Amino acid sequence: MTSHNLLVHERDTVNNDDFAMDTDGIVNLARASLIPSHGHPDHIMSLTTLATSLRCRFRQQDAITDLDEAIDLYRRALDVCPSESPACASVLHDLARCLYDRFTKLATTSDLQDAIKYEQTALNFRPPGHPDHAQSHDSLANYLQLKMKCRGALSQLEHSSGPISSSRTRKMIGHVVFEVLKAFPPRLLETHTGTLCGRDLQILRFEQSQVYNQLLASSSALDNLPSTSHIREVVSTYFRYVTLSHRWGRFEPLLRDIEGQAVYDLDPTDGLSKLQFFCLTSFRHGYLWAWSDTCCIDKDSSAELQEAIGSMFSWYRQSALTMVHLADVLDGGVLTDSEWFKRGWTLQELLAPRTMLFFTRDWSLYKDGTSPNHKENSIIIGELKRVTRIASRHLTHFHPGVDDPRSMLEWASARCTTRPEDIAYSLLGIFNLHIPVLYGESEENALGRLLAEVISKSGDTSILDWVGQPSSFHSCFPATLTPYQTFPPSQPLSADPRRCSFIGDIWKKLFAPGPRNAARKMHQALSNLPRTQFTNFRLLLPCIIYRIQTIRQVRVDTSSGMHIHQIHAVGLEPIEIALSEKLKNTSRKRAPYILIRPRHSDLLNPDVETDDTSAHEWLARLEQPFSALLLTKLPHFDEYRRVASSCNIIARPTDSAGVLKGQVGTLTIV
């Protein structure tokens, strides 16, 4: 079934009111298939399909924004639909249904009146005997009956009477509360009572608050509805919450330990005492709500745990304040001595919040007793920079994603988690990625799945630049994050302008135009390669390949047991490398080993198509040393395996001609 036919099928399913598919997926598919061109024959169909999908999602999720967009789409379809077209009646009928739905949600008189008007027009296109006559006839009858029943209320609404205005205000507030809270943690601690509140209880507390009554009173006094932006500001301010970041200790209270009780009433064990002080300190700072990862998540529910891990970064980012409790730092102590900086989960808890305060063991504010945000304190930022090796700009304004993944892996490389597989899960928010959380899998498997997703999303091959023990998940990935503690010593270097000038002179005199054409050909071949991908446990890696002519073991290091090999590859200077495994001595013309230079975005700049100077500069840059990967070809398959080394393999082309002896291609590595 084509995507267009699939959407038509889903639209018809929605109209039959027995839609049972994933509405978010359907909306996304319909949105992706939207045809913007008015002249396209399927333009109207694409508009109405997306509108119908949005109405279905509204009926499931009750988000008024979906209904508003659906109404707008149907109106756009009506504007371009020929009046004589059979589709016109369907658009009119569907638009009327959406307006009716919005009337039942917001009680806006004009919506019901417009629904009646559009259904009456649709009925003109569907006279008795028409297959859809009964559909429009019954709908119009229902709308007219509703208008008769609500005549008194509608009259009051038209005159901006108090009760109806209050009812509309309540509905508007309820909608905004739903929209604000759906992005927040589902459970929050009420700081002045110490009770754990789920979503329904949070909303009840708000409706019992003076803030809520003031919103209603202002609407009545002004004889007008407050703006949605004003309601959102009031609601967001009321539900501001504080997050706790800490190193877990013994006897931390879980959900089952505090559910239905006030934390202030419980015996202060170590974990409970910390929770009590956290709630109290949050209350003293003027916040009504607080969140702790110990007791606000049902860890017995795998589905809830999966959702929490996927949302954790966002929850810390949206918090009004994150309080970091350093249980191992006394007053007058040094922040950087804390074990908090060695834990895996606390990395995202450091980077995500915009506002953060550090507290010592007895809940005294660290150093600065007046600062509202330690991320704005240059002295404390300096301490954090020294202990984490993270640049100040990331500490204060970090943006999650897969840009520069090698740096983020370095930040996490010296940290650990109680459960080994958590070291991978704790980085999901930092990379803004989602992979299934499978507790019980090995650290290598969890880390391998994470790295596979990172390299597929980013195409950044710098994460392949490591030295150490390979993973059983894939030969190009390390078994742990430890190898990322040291940043690769050999990075792509900018070409020396004097060298470029020298090479340019030589080329002009001796080699033009052959080498320039060869350089452009290699550059074009690199540009045309597909991006790096990981699929079915295979890494599809674009690279420059240097064939190895001879490998010879020259000695064994008695202290380390490493096998020292000398390698001669086409176009490269001889290399000595230390390997834990002994390679076969070979002098065959087609040895089963190769050295490769993975393609990186730097290898594609500058554009060398028309500019001779750029071609010289690009080739000179490729003459610089680079970190190479040693691969061995597997028998019977056109696949390779990486041979791990105990030190970086730094390769250097012999000269510009050596660079051009490399072969451009995409290899499959397992």
Image (cartoon, rainbow, N blue to C red):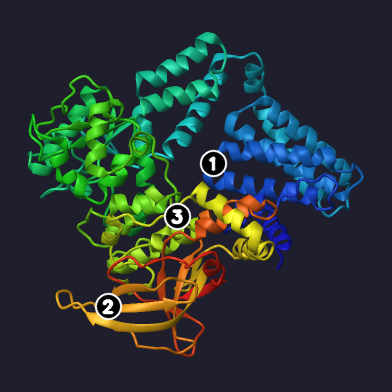
User: Is label 3 in a helix, a strand or a loop?
Assistant: loop
> Mark 1 vs mark 3: which is more N-terminal?
1
Earlier sequence position, callout 3 versus callout 2: 3
Q: In the structure shown, which secondary structural element does the residue marked by tag 2 occupy? A: strand
What residue is shown at x 17% (from left), y 48% (from top)?
A: 248
Residue of label 1: 62
Q: Dot 3 surroundings within 10 Å: few (below 14), some, or many (20 or more)?
A: some
Q: Say which amino acid is labelled 2.
A: Ile
Residue identifier under label 3: 492
The residue nearer to you, when weighing 474 against 31, is: 474
Q: Residue 650 is drawn in which quadrant?
A: bottom left
Q: Which residue is mark 2?
A: 564
How far apart in space, not on screen, are marks 1 and 3 (Cα)? 53 Å
Is there any visible trace of residue 22 in the rendered image?
no
Say if 358 sits above or below 210 in the image: below
Q: Is residue 407 left or right of residue 608?
A: left
- Cα distance between the residues tagged 3 and 2: 26 Å
